[in-house]
Image (cartoon, helix red, strand yellow):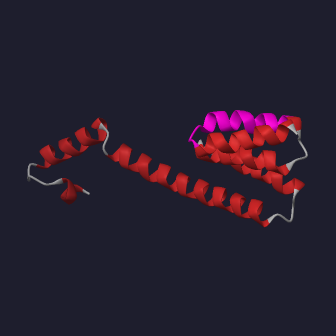
Amino acid sequence: DNQVLRSNRSACHSQLGQHKQALRDAEEAVRMAPRWPKGYCRKAAALFYLQQYDDAEEAYWSALRLSPNDDLIRQALEDVQREKSSSSKRALVNKVCKDMYTPAAATSRSQTMQLDGQGLTDADVE
């Protein structure tokens, strides 16, 4: 029953926002009882809060293979997949915005406006 102790301690760490410690205990629970889906769920939850979405998804898949009819695991997996998709979109938007406003991009826009000599604004150039 040490895996239950590790699993419960993992949940406590998560509630306290101590997600790295939660992950350590969850991984230990999985090591102790590799056929127990709850250990994988604790691991997935910790990974989710650490924004390691690919690993969280993999852990939920492991839990679902062990308990294929568990709707709560299936819902948690869908939540991770949805967040993973949203996170990818946010990262793309942030990259595009960052690329648009790097010093090199700003210099390029400034040079374009100076060469034109018309006093154009950024909105006019874009």
Q: In the displayed structure, would residue 50 be above or below residue 71?
A: above
Q: Nearer the viewer, residue 53 or 113?
A: 53
Judge left or right: residue 96 versus residue 41: left
What residue is drawn where x is 80% and y is 50%?
Answer: 38
The verdict on residue 18 being magenta is: yes
Q: In the displayed structure, would residue 6 be above or below residue 42?
A: above
What residue is drawn where x is 82% and y is 63%?
Answer: 70
Where residue 39 appears, x then y in whole percent?
Answer: 80, 45
What residue is drawn where x is 59% and y is 41%?
Answer: 50
Count the marks: how many?
A: 0
Task: State whether residue 54 appears in this view.
Answer: no
Where residue 26 appears, x then y in whole percent?
Answer: 75, 39
Judge left or right: residue 102 versus residue 41: left
Which residues make up the magenta segment? Answer: 16-31
What residue is drawn where x is 79% and y is 53%?
Answer: 61
Q: In the displayed structure, would residue 7 be above or below residue 65?
A: above
Magenta: main secondary structure? helix
Judge left or right: residue 49 versus residue 7: left
Quadrant location, the C terminus: bottom left
Where residue 75 appears, x then y in whole percent?
Answer: 71, 64
Question: Going by the picture, which residue comes out furthest to the left?
Answer: 118
Q: Nearer the viewer, residue 93 or 125?
A: 93
Q: Quadrant location of residue 31? A: top right
Task: State whether residue 19 appears in this view.
Answer: yes
The verdict on residue 123 being magenta is: no
